[in-house]
Image (cartoon, helix red, strand yellow):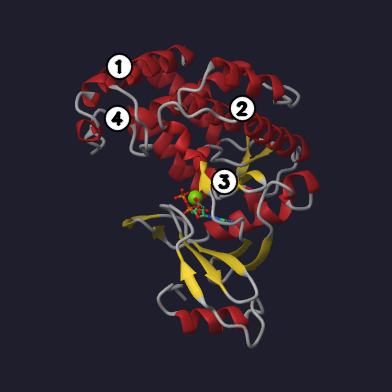
């Protein structure tokens, strides 16, 4: 069954049948709660409540010709189930209200009309110190609560990792990958050339990619960037763990720090995150830095572009900085 926000009656029947609405409860409106690319997400309003309903399909919602693992919402639901058993983590995520595994659907608590943190990419936007602290504390807690020698295969998320692997560690570094970077910003293609023909860089990135694909022992959010953080009336919250897996803790923190650099945050914000993050045993700062470097590069010269407002010179300087992290 494919959800359809236009078919209010069918949606109402479905939600009643599953027991997520009362038998007489009427769907009064349906809307898109915010921007998303991967999945079909709706906010459903009734006189009694509002709910978020999220369905994953066998393709990327915004680009239906691109296949994607259909059951990713089910895996996302498993993460929510685990995380919400820990009060501190539950406090910073929407509650999972239901899962329909057959149809790859999640029902989530509505955190209210709120924006994500992608506004940080706009000039002059400063990451609130309290939010930075909250989101770092969340990551520390996640990594500490769920480090194990026996990770659950149900959260290995191999297919989503394989998809992300291509976008992070492969496509950006191919000479011909079908992306016209000059259409993103004139001159960007030329900036990327040296990094696509650097054999040493390729070797380092391949090694990092292998690390990403190898099974680790820490449960990661897997997509810990401003698009997965919501600024709500009750503070910063974390959503969208569809790329979760058991892997290296350095990956989550590395990605977070990469986005603070892409968002031109002052070094004091980065220092705060670094100082507040409680490193799990064996944490490798060099590996963290390498993941930061590769994330910066792939966001600048890969397919998954961000709503950045950087000049070509700023991108060049970030690429150099990222390259230095990948030695
Ligand atoms: N529980 C929630 N409460 C309030 N708003 C939400 C909630 N879940 C999602 N949203 C809104 O819907 C948007 C899309 O949700 P989400 O990021 O989970 O979808 P997605 O398709 O996986 O996105 P992406 O393509 O960025 O991975 C969010 O940016 C947010 O604005
Ligand atoms: Mg998503």
N-terminal of the pair, mark 4 or mark 2, is: 4
The part of the image, by quadrant, that contains residue 247 is top right
Camera-nearest label, 3 or 4: 3
Say whether disc 3 or disc 4 marks the residue closer to the N-terminus: 4
**Quick check: 62 left or right of 82?**
left
Residue 230: mark? 3
Q: Do the residues labelled 1 and 3 touch (CB within 8 Å)?
A: no
Residue 214, image x and y in percent?
58, 35
The answer to whether any part of residue 100 appears in the image is no
| Residue receiving disc 1 | 313
Residue plotted at (52% across, 60% down): 71
In the rendered structure, find residue 174 and report the number of the disc placed on it: 4
Q: Name the residue under label 2.
A: 250
Disc 3 Cβ-to-ligand 1 distance below 8 Å: yes
Q: What kind of element bears circle 2?
A: helix
Image position of 276 with respect to 49: above or below:
above
Question: What's the distance in space between the residues labelled 1 and 3, CA to CA?
Answer: 30 Å
Location of residue 179 (image quadrant): top left
């Amino acid at each position: 069954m494919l959800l359809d926000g236009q078919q209010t009656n069918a949606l109402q029947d479905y939600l009643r049948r599953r027991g997520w609405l009362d038998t007489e409860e009427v769907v009064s409106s349906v809307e898109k709660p915010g921007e998303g690319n991967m999945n079909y997400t709706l906010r459903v309003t009734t006189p009694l409540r509002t709910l978020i309903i999220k369905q994953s399909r066998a393709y990327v919602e915004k680009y239906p010709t691109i296949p994607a693992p259909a059951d990713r919402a089910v895996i996302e639901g498993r993460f929510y189930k685990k995380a919400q058993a820990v009060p501190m983590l539950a406090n910073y995520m929407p509650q999972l209200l239901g899962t329909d595994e057959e149809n790859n659907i999640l029902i989530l608590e509505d955190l209210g009309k709120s924006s994500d943190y992608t506004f940080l990419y706009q000039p002059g936007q400063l990451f609130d110190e309290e939010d930075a602290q909250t989101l770092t504390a969340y990551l520390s807690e996640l990594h500490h609560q769920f480090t194990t020698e026996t990770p659950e295969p149900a959260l290995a998320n191999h297919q989503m990792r394989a998809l992300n692997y291509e976008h992070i560690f492969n496509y950006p570094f191919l000479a011909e990958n079908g992306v016209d970077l000059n259409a993103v910003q004139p001159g960007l293609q030329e900036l990327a050339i040296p990094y696509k023909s650097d054999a040493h860089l390729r070797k380092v990135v391949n090694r990092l990619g292998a690390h990403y694909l190898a099974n680790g022992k820490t449960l990661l959010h897997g997509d810990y960037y401003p698009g997965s953080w919501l600024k709500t009336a009750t503070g910063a919250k974390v959503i969208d763990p569809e790329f979760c897996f058991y892997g290296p803790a350095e990956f989550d923190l590395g990605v977070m720090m990469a986005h603070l650099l892409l968002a031109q945050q002052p070094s004091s914000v980065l220092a705060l995150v670094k100082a507040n993050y409680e490193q799990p045993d064996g944490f490798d700062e060099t590996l963290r830095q390498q993941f930061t470097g590769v994330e910066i590069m792939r966001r600048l010269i890969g397919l998954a572009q961000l709503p950045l407002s950087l000049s070509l010179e700023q991108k060049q300087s970030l690429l150099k900085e990222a390259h230095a992290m990948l030695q």
